[in-house]
Image (tube, coloured by chain):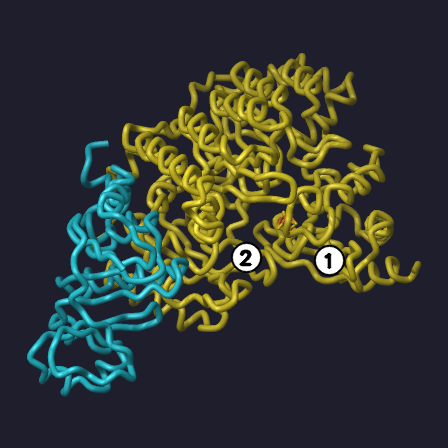
Chain colours: A yellow, B cyan
Amino acid sequence: MYQYDEFDQRIVDERVRQFRDQTARFLAGQLTEDQFRPLRLMNGLYLQRHAPMLRVAIPYGLLSTRQLRMLAHIARTYDRGYGHFTTRQNVQYNWPDLDRVPDILADLASVQMHAIQTSGNCIRNVTSDPIAGVAADELEDPRPYCEIIRQWSTFHPEFSYLPRKFKIAVTGAEQDRAAVQVHDIGLRLVRNEAGEVGFAVLVGGGLGRTPIIGETIRPFLAKRDLLSYLEAILRVYNRFGRRDNKYKARIKILLKETGVAAFTTQVEQEWQQIKDHLVLDDTEIERVKAHFTEPPYENLPAELPGAVAQRTESDPAFAAWFRHNTFAHKVPGYRIVFLSLKPPKVPPGDLDHRQMDAIAELADRFSFGEIRVTHNQNMIFADVRASELHALWTELREWGVATPNINKATDIICCPGLDFCSLANASSIPIAEEIYSRLDNFDYLYDLGDLRINISGCMNGCGHHTVGHIGILGVDKKGEEWYQLTLGGSSANEAALGERLGPAIAKPDVADAVTTILKTYVELRAPDESFLQTVRRIGITPFQEQVYGHH
Amino acid sequence: MVIIKDGRAIAGEWLHLDNDAAIPPSGQVTVSLHRWQAERTALMARPEPVGLRLEAGDAPDAIADDLQRFPLIVLSFATMADGRLFSLARLLRERFGFAGELRARGDFIVDQIFFLNRVGVDTFEPTEDISPEAVGQAIRTFSVRYQAATDEKQPLYRRERR
Ligand code: SF4
């Protein structure tokens, strides 16, 4: 993975010094709350319902074990012992003291981490495919470009006071696991007719209040032009994006109001003026790429080793985990292992400091000392020898991160909601727990197949409810918590926004409604048809009839 | 209001004329883009130079040929959060070749001076006083600059051996 050089290190060190000074000035009354707000937000610091919340960047989801141990240390030293992994490849701490945040940042800087631009109206943490580099369907590893974009966007002098937040995602694979269609800018590595690899550029996707699928404004962009093209898009957005209404300030609204064709022309004209002044050199691409070389894989047979194969026959619990939590690797003899951060009765995405330390230790032993975090709020060991799967499973199970439910109905994405977030209309964690408790039968869970349930506590959509196969959105009705359900959303290749099922549902009835939806699916599905396929085939009416007919 | 230029506080020798104020027969004045466009001939007939004031939403393209004649362009910050002026500054410097004094004036804070300096602003006239030392420190907040901008013509990867 990428290692900081002296320049990268200096910039995070200087950031710590700057934020220490800003915090001191705020605490001494020399900065007003209004003045401090944008400064602290650009360091991922919110003043929340109970205490400040600090959001730390995990650039494109990659962590070394040294970094994960530091996250554990921070949870233990400055917080209440745990951290929350989010849908944007960040980690959040819910209980730090404001005056100790500079110390946390200093600790992070000591392991090449930061909280720079994890909030605020600026370019946010760049996200990517969590199995980048080991995916069999990959044209090229997207992570070097993520790192190049990370550096370009860090303290960009022109784009630090945008109309609104700005999110960029990059994928290099056929299957889109980075949700590039629902980002402000989505980049997809593609090959053109001449055989060169470059980027398809999508703009204007996004979740939140006005969910929209992004538009391709350029089918092919040469690598040398990556930064100048981003700069052209950002400049058009910075100058012409709406600033009069924060709900209309994202680039998706500008794109819609300007029209895709006119917007594209504006960007292209701007780009023509700057493209020769800002060239991404091959030498720089190669320099960064050199940090993402393959680990020293062994030459191993492709078949599953006999002892492990036998366990999948004799031990049903292991077999279930093998089947649902491990995936094919591009190198023979290796598997990609998902750690489920969705055991029963724990808020999705939460880990305590002992678990983090233990996971770091296991990653050192089993997966070349690297961990990925996913936007589904799970973790990945990308390079596990198949022969060691059983040994690893035994230990992961002890730490509660081997629930065999990856991509299943209990692998719920859920934002912090009313329990922590000051913007929430309704709670989300208790809803997740209630749905989870109805799905405790694994045979039923597996029979339901791949299923994504996403829950957000308000329209901001941090729980990505609009792209859930089943989406659940908390709304406030005269001070009570109600929930709006949608069906058929997806952020994968065939991205779609969920369709509204009907009137909002009262809190005590939400889990029942979900149970009814699942039952209806089981009754009406065609052989081998997934939930999403069924919804797309038959539409939402049969589900409406069942859910609302009962009430 | 203090004005900081080249590390020193300077005197406010410019009169920033409101749109409805009469144009004085002499003395240095700045006018809005609108007024410049409306009263260009009369303003050019004055013995002393005229400076231009731009707001965040102004597009200088319409008077691109005039820009060189202003010794001073003032970027008026109505609110510190309005980042359009950062793009405007770069365009003035890098696209329109404006070489005169570029001044940030109004509601911005010391923590933004690092960025302002990078996009070509060289004079600071904040609503809340900032000392010359603080301005100097702010400009030096970060010793590493990844991007090309007005101050650095090339990105870091072309400037340094990495
Ligand atoms: S979706 Fe709303 S409630 Fe949930 S974390 Fe985001 S802002 Fe908070």
In the depicted structure, whether residue A451 falls above or below residue A219 = above
Let me know if residue A188 appears in the view: no
Q: Under tag 1, what secondary structure? A: strand
Q: Which mark is residue A475?
A: 1
Marks counted in the figure total: 2
Give the image location of residue A84, x and y in percent: 61, 34
Disc 2 secondary structure class: loop
The circle drawn on residue A206 is 2
Could you give the CA–CA distance between mark 2 and mark 1, rounded to whole angstroms? 20 Å
Image quadrant occupied by the N terminus of chain A? top left
How many neighbours does mark 2 have within 10 angstroms: few (below 14), some (14-19), or many (20 or more)? many
Foreground pick, B16 / A452: B16
- B21 sits left or right of A503 in the view: left
Q: Quadrant of the C terminus of chain A?
A: bottom right
Q: Which chain carries label 2?
A: A
Q: Of the residues under marks 2 and 1, which one precedes in the sequence?
A: 2
